Image (cartoon, grey):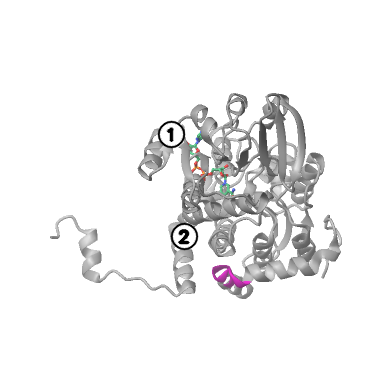
Amino acid sequence: MATTNSIIRDPSLAPEGKLKIDWAQAHMPVLNRIREEFERELPFKGLKVAISLHLEAKTAYLAKVIQAGGAQVAITGSNPLSTQDDVCAALAEDGITVFAKYNPTAEEYHDLLVKTVETKPDLIIDDGGDLVTILHTERQDLLATIRGGAEETTTGILRLKAMEKDGSLKFPMVAVNDAYCKHLFDNRYGTGQSVWDGINRTTNLVVAGKTVVVSGYGWCGKGVAMRAKGLGANVVVTEVDAIKAVEAYMDGFAVMPMDEAAKVGDFFVAVTGNKDVIRGTHFENMKDGAILSNAGHFDVEVNLVELAAMAVSKRTVRRNIEEYALKDGRRVYVLAEGRLVNLAAGDGHPAEIMDMTFALQALALRYANENYQSLGAKVINVPYELDEQVARTKLSAMGVAIDTLSGEQKAYLDSWTAH
Ligand code: NAI
């Protein structure tokens, strides 16, 4: 059943997209088990679900799992450059309504998000808060049907918490990012690996022996720094949080302010969720040939407006690499227009990692649907039992067994008098 109302680039790309989704599915055992459960129990029967996530193969499989749970699904991207047109075509052919294209204009991108909420969903999955923002600002008329939803990333949760605090949030949102099986693996190992995959395939340059500056030593930054070290780089971390800075230092990395780091870096990866982390005064001191990238959710971490103002010329020198020539002859390179380098210039996290993240998304959405009346318009933590369920299923899929507490051990841990 092909959907007729989808807006996609090219339906003829469906066979390639299907192969990509099949590959992802084959490496997502936890989500496969949830799919079987959903097919039996149909937890979303008769409901509409709207999704905004980076629209590549793993996300496509999540959409299919939710569809298998009985939902009518509409999906859009969560970044103009991370959508894959062949994957969109395959999903549209499978009866999912797709509003997404690679590299739409800013206006088109916004219209596609609006079209997705206009399907009047009961439940939403958001990544960075775009659907939630539209529903709470320009399209409040569509709030009525929404029961609740789930948010994927750190930046989206920060925004939801700000909304909860000033009383604007109108429905419960489950903070999937804050679950252990999300940020410990997706943010750290997923971002750590896929950022270097994106940078390496885009630049085709050596990392060993170079200086890599990682801004932000949060869950993502830890992964990016760890993998840079593994590739043989000298790693410098910049931070604003004293505790994270001590952690980076004791993990063996040099820690310094960006004013200093700007002078020594060959590669820069900003992954803070904050704006203007790399800006004018820093560009002034960079080495000729410095390569700048962002892995944070929005394209605000590297101030490209200031860089463009300082540049005498700008040109594309390779797919996803823009060269900014500065007045004194130095050249600074920006990857993927400063958008998340692992998704805009790569395929995102490995499927085995997204297996856990999207298993949590599927379970969190079900939880939101079954409990929305009692949850209230708040940011809700993923219940620990769901987190543990995902970890146990993952262990079993990997063929890894662990020990179990004996009765005596449990009693010992629960007691304050036992010796
Ligand atoms: P986090 O909150 O764990 O870490 C962010 C770190 O950045 C904090 O330690 C904070 O102190 C630091 N920071 C803030 N402003 C700074 C500044 N001006 N200079 C230096 N450090 C600064 O957040 P997490 O989970 O690491 O996420 C970071 C960003 O990456 C968010 O925007 C998140 O949505 C996004 N993200 C991207 C992924 C990807 O695939 N590229 C995957 C998951 C999250």
- Image quarter of the C terminus: bottom left
- Image quarter of the N terminus: bottom right
Height in image: 364 above or below 80? below
The dominant secondary structure in magenta is helix
Q: Is residue 73 left or right of residue 105?
A: left
| Residue depicted at x 52% and y 34% | 264
Give the amino acid type for the residue marked by disc 2 in the picture: Asp
For label 1, the SS is loop
| Residue depicted at x 62% and y 49% | 205
Marks counted in the figure total 2
Q: Which residues are magenta?
A: 26-32
Height in image: 393 above or below 193? below
For the residue carrying disc 2, how many other residues have a C-alpha within 10 Å: few (<14), some (14-19), or many (20+)?
A: many
Along the viewing direction, whichever of 146 and 174 lies nearer the viewer: 174
For the residue carrying disc 1, how many other residues have a C-alpha within 10 Å: few (<14), some (14-19), or many (20+)?
A: few
- Residue 39: x and y, percent? 63, 74
Is disc 1 in contact with disc 2, using a CB cutoff of under 8 Å?
Answer: no
- Residue 188: x and y, percent? 49, 52
Q: Is residue 240 visible?
A: yes
- Residue 20: x and y, percent? 70, 67
Ligand 1 lies under 8 Å from the Cβ of mark 1: yes
Give the amino acid type for the residue marked by disc 1 in the picture: Asp
Please check the rendered image and state whether residue 31 is part of the magenta-colored stretch, yes or no.
yes
**Mark drawn on residue 398:** none
Residue underneath mark 2: 387
- Residue 328: x and y, percent? 68, 24
Along the viewing direction, whichever of 141 and 391 lies nearer the viewer: 391
**Mark drawn on residue 241:** 1
Along the viewing direction, whichever of 419 and 401 lies nearer the viewer: 401
| Residue depicted at x 53% and y 45% | 379
